[in-house]
Image (cartoon, coloured by chain):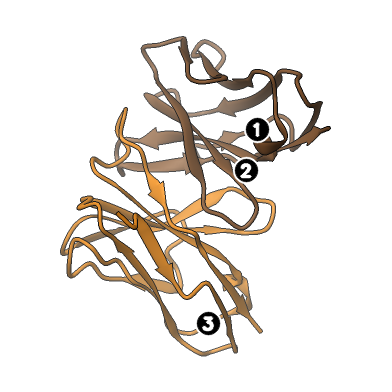
Chain colours: A brown, B orange
Amino acid sequence: GESVGLHLPTLSVQEGDNSIINCAYSNSASDYFIWYKQESGKGPQFIIDIRSNMDKRQGQRVTVLLNKTVKHLSLQIAATQPGDSAVYFCAENDTGRRALTFGSGTRLQVQP
Amino acid sequence: NAGVTQTPKFRILKIGQSMTLQCTQDMNHNYMYWYRQDPGMGLKLIYYSVGAGITDKGEVPNGYNVSRSTTEDFPLRLELAAPSQTSVYFCASSYGGGLAGDEQFFGPGTRLTVL
């Protein structure tokens, strides 16, 4: 069935470096994508989203890039901080169900 | 606003027991969702609701039931608990159903163990 997945299960970066977390999706009809951050023992927290009519969207220290040609989504975190350590999920909307399909997540570890 | 609240935070059940996971939101959101998250995995949709009195199945509904009698509450019922239902359960809500620009807000989760 349709699915959203991630290339890397764990990413380790040095504090201050930039992080890039990747995500592949298979549903070409999806028109909305979201990145969530989940800290240990907590529920997912919205980071940034992007609509399918956009290629790039920037937030505070975060940028999401969307390549519809290869169905690829990425999250870039600038100047990664220890507080960025968490699991990051990409998700896509399912307009038929008005619900999200989540990927399996990437764990980001920030080394001091 | 308290946002999305869930009770209990933790629960241990014996096989065959039943329980209800409570979820309440105070944001007047139309849409509410139940997800389960197995260790090291993403979230899978169990059930969702587009408004009071309306519910629909998600990806993994077997073994669960829901009801939506009010806008605020969306309880999840496990009738005959099985070890396969050991997971962390998250409730979420949104105003417009996950359309572009419509954020889903998540509760803190309920960690359920079935022994």
Amino acid type, residue under disc 3 in the picture: Ala
Q: What residue lies at 67% left-to-right and 37% top-to-bottom?
A: A83
Q: State if disc 2 and disc 3 touch (CB < 8 Å).
A: no
Q: Position of residue B99 (x, y in %)?
A: 29, 33
| Residue sitting nearer the eye, B69 or B72 | B72
Please say if A39 is above or below A33.
below
Measured in 3D between alpha carbons, the distance from the residue under mark 3 to the one under mark 1, in whole angstroms, is 31 Å
Numbered circle sitting on residue B81: 3
Please say if A27 is above or below A53.
below
Numbered circle sitting on residue A6: 1
Quadrant in which the C terminus of chain B is drawn:
bottom right
User: Label 3: few (<14), some or many (≥20) within 10 Å?
Assistant: many
User: Label 1: few (<14), some or many (≥20) within 10 Å?
Assistant: many
Q: State if disc 2 and disc 1 touch (CB < 8 Å).
A: yes
Chain letter of disc 1 in the image: A
Left or right: A33 as drawn, with respect to A17: left
Amino acid type, residue under disc 1 in the picture: Leu
Q: State if disc 1 and disc 3 touch (CB < 8 Å).
A: no
Quadrant in which the N terminus of chain B is drawn:
bottom left
| Residue sitting nearer the eye, A55 or A78 | A78
Left or right: B100 as drawn, with respect to A66: left
Q: Callout 2: helix, strand or loop?
A: loop
Q: Position of residue B29 (x, y in %)?
A: 23, 50
User: Label 2: few (<14), some or many (≥20) within 10 Å?
Assistant: many
In the image, are marks 3 and 2 on the same chain?
A: no
Numbered circle sitting on residue A104: 2
